[in-house]
Image (spheres, rainbow, N blue to C red):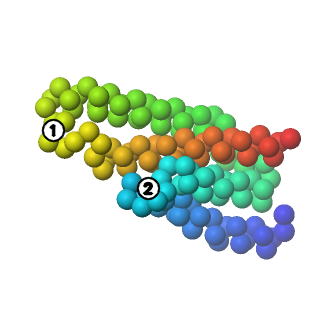
Amino acid sequence: MDVIVRTVVKGILPFILLLGIAIMFHGHLTPGGSFPGGAVVASAFALVAVTIGIDEAESKMGEKTVHALEAVAVIVVALVIIYEAFIRQYAGLAGMFGLWNSPTVLTLNVVGGVMVMGTLTLVVFLVLRE
């Protein structure tokens, strides 16, 4: 790509990432959440992959990194489910805070956003390789 395109992408990339992260973190309060936030972050990675080339983009964030992020996200979801279903209920905290309080939904929004980001990033890399 042209030097101008690369420079513009370097300039707007932090704002795109910040917007995606903000959508993920505010999804439990406003419209949005895990899917729109993850899609915006994945679009930033797609923009980088198109701009600098798929080989260089995969060297910066390859499949193993994305799979590791998704694995951590799945573990966090499992821990939240175990906590909500068993620990809080048997500790007598379910009546005090309710089942789905804001920190739990926030955690699930962010983790879901990481899962969506990883999946869409892998799809973009796969399409660009073809």
Q: Is residue 71 above or below residue 51?
A: above
Viewer-closest of 107 and 9 = 107
Residue at x-position 22% and y-position 42%:
98
Asked whether residue 65 is in view, the answer is yes
What element does badge 1 sit on? helix
Please indicate whether residue 121 sits to the left or right of residue 86 in the image: right
Amino acid type shown at disc 2: Gly
Which of pointers 2 and 1 lies earlier in the amino acid sequence? 2
Q: Nearer the viewer, mark 2 or mark 1?
A: 1
The residue that disc 2 covers is: 27
Q: Is residue 29 above or below residue 69?
A: below
Please indicate whether residue 8 sits to the left or right of residue 93 in the image: right
Q: Is residue 125 above or below residue 10?
A: above
Mark 1 surroundings: few (<14), some (14-19) or many (≥20) residues within 10 A: few
Viewer-closest of 103 and 45 = 103
Asked whether residue 21 is in view, the answer is no
The quarter of the image holding the C terminus is top right
Viewer-closest of 98 and 34 = 98
Residue 94 appears at what percent x and percent y? 19, 36
